[in-house]
Amino acid sequence: MRNEKPDKSSKSRTSEAVAILDPQLVVAAVNGLGSGLRLPGRSVVFRQGDAADAVFYVRDGRVQLTVVSDHGKEGVIALFGPGEFFGEGCLAGQSVRLASAVTTVASNIVRIEKTSMIRLLHDQPAFSEKFTAFLVARNIQVEADLVDQLFNSSEKRLARLLLLLANFNNDGQMRIVPKVSQELLAARVGTTRSRVNFFLNRFRKLGLIEYNGEIKVHPALLNIVVHD
């Protein structure tokens, strides 16, 4: 690995910021429309196959989206944190959930009925514009995740995931990754827990992260992603 400063021009193709909406904007928009859910960790928000009849917003906490194949194999396909919506497929005609959503830590989530969300988007053009931009940014991130999964090594995928979880924005500051288990990181990266542990220790020895109960990401970790 070459010891170089991250190139700011490469930010868009390596560490796209997680798409979020201004919490104050969301709270003001959904006030009186949604119901608040305070859920402990490992709580099911909805299950694969459930009716898709609502949109959810994460006020605080973390939610993982998982899919189970016909053969019983489970895969983590997305992680959602504060400021993110999920379950919006119902707005595009999705009748049943294609995945399950489960909290990974204690979480505060807002549930908004499909009809109420549609009315909100119709009645508040400013919010509708922001929400559309959020969905576009989410789609760009999903495409980047797919490319990452297809073409990058598990080490690079883990580095990129840590940068995303830390909301790294190339400002030269260390960022803290929200509490997440090595098992969850392994499931999201598509490797084993032992490999994740190996790479985390390697990153720590190289001075790219601090890892002592919580993970702090150093800007130099970006070099793992942008260089072969």
Image: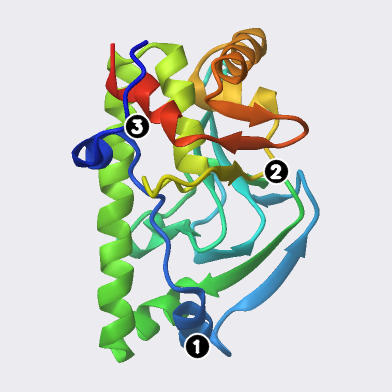
* Residue 194 place in picture, x, y as percent: 66, 8
- Residue 172 appears in which quarter of the rendering? top left
Q: Residue at x 33, y 44 (%)?
A: 16
Q: Residue at x 32, y 30 (%)?
A: 5
Q: Residues within 10 Å of mark 2 (few under 14, many from 20)?
A: many
Q: Does 131 sit left or right of 200 as displayed?
A: left
Residue on which disc 3 sits: 145
Mark 1 / mark 2, whichever is N-terminal: 1
The residue sitting at 61% across, 70% down in the picture is: 110
Residue 31 visible to an observer of this rendering: yes
Q: Residue 48, can we see it?
A: no
Mark 3 neighbour class, 10 Å CA radius: few under 14, some 14 to 19, many 20 or more: some
Look at mark 1 in the image and give the residue it sits on: 28
| Mark 3: amino acid | Asp
Contact check, label 1 and label 2, Cβ < 8 Å? no
The mark that comes first in sequence, 1 or 3, is 1
Look at the image and tell me in which quarter the C terminus lies: top left
Residue visible at 59% across and 42% down in the picture: 64
Q: Secondary structure at mark 2?
A: loop
> Mark 2 highlights which residue?
104
Amino acid, disc 1: Ala
At which x and y percent is residue 82? 56, 60
Instruction: Say which of 100 and 197 sits in front.
Output: 197
Locate residue 226, reporting x and y percent. Answer: 28, 23
Residues at marks 2 and 3 touching, judged by CB atoms closer than 8 Å? no
Amino acid tagged 2: Thr
